[in-house]
Image (cartoon, rainbow, N blue to C red):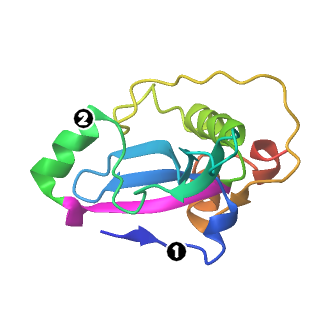
Amino acid sequence: MNWIRVPKDYEQYQGFIYLITNIKTGKRYIGLKNMFTVRKLKPLKGYKRVRKKRVEVDWRNYYGSSENLAVDVEKYGKENFKREFLCFCHSKWQLKFMEGKFQTYCEVLSSDKWYNNLISFKCTGYYMKKKPKLMPAGRRLLKEYGIKEEKLIR
């Protein structure tokens, strides 16, 4: 199954928070994925400075890092999973912060309805210069758990 609603302007973001749902069992997984990484290139002839290039990683085929989820993807097949974007973020810090917020608000550790078995993120104080782009699936999930959009994105 492909990602649902890939925005045309995705290249301006660092990564995204996603929701993977097992259609057969209803179990879900919330995670984050960096879409780009920085590759270091050799300096040009006669120069010492290392060059950097922003490269897109293979995020289109990504199914999460959870072992339990990987077992179920093998068991049920990829066609029985729905992959949706919850929000797009501008920085790695923002990605970790928003993933932690989604996981905490949805109480992923206190229910068997989730593949998530760990919430781990470390964030220092930081002001969001650019707000993350909340997608329809993200709004739907917040509404399901009775969370106002303003509470998530401040």
Image quarter of the C terminus: top right
Q: Residues within 10 Å of mark 2 (few under 14, many from 20)?
A: some
For label 2, the SS is: helix
Q: CA distance from mark 2 to mark 1?
A: 26 Å
Name the one closer to the observer, 55 or 14: 55
Residue 72: name its quadrant. top left
Q: Residue furthest front?
A: 46
Magenta span includes 118: no
Dot placed on the residue nearer the N-terminal end, 2 or 1: 1
> Label 2 is placed on what type of residue?
Asn
Q: Residues within 10 Å of mark 1 (few under 14, many from 20)?
A: few
Which residue sits at x=36%, y=53%?
62
Pointer 2 residue:
68
Q: What segment carries the magenta color?
A: 78-88
**In the figure, is residue 111 to the left or right of 55?**
left
For label 1, the SS is: loop
Does 1 sit above or below residue 107?
Answer: below
Which residue sits at x=43%, y=57%?
59
Where does the image place residue 120, in percent across and percent down from the top left? Answer: 54, 22
Where does the image place residue 40, in percent across and percent down from the top left? Answer: 56, 43
Does 77 sit above or below residue 94?
Answer: below
Name the one closer to the observer, 125 or 24: 125
Does 101 sit above or below residue 88?
Answer: above
Q: Residue furthest bottom?
A: 8
Pointer 1 residue:
5
Name the one closer to the observer, 8 or 131: 8
> Label 1 is placed on what type of residue?
Arg
Magenta span includes 86: yes
Image quarter of the N terminus: bottom left
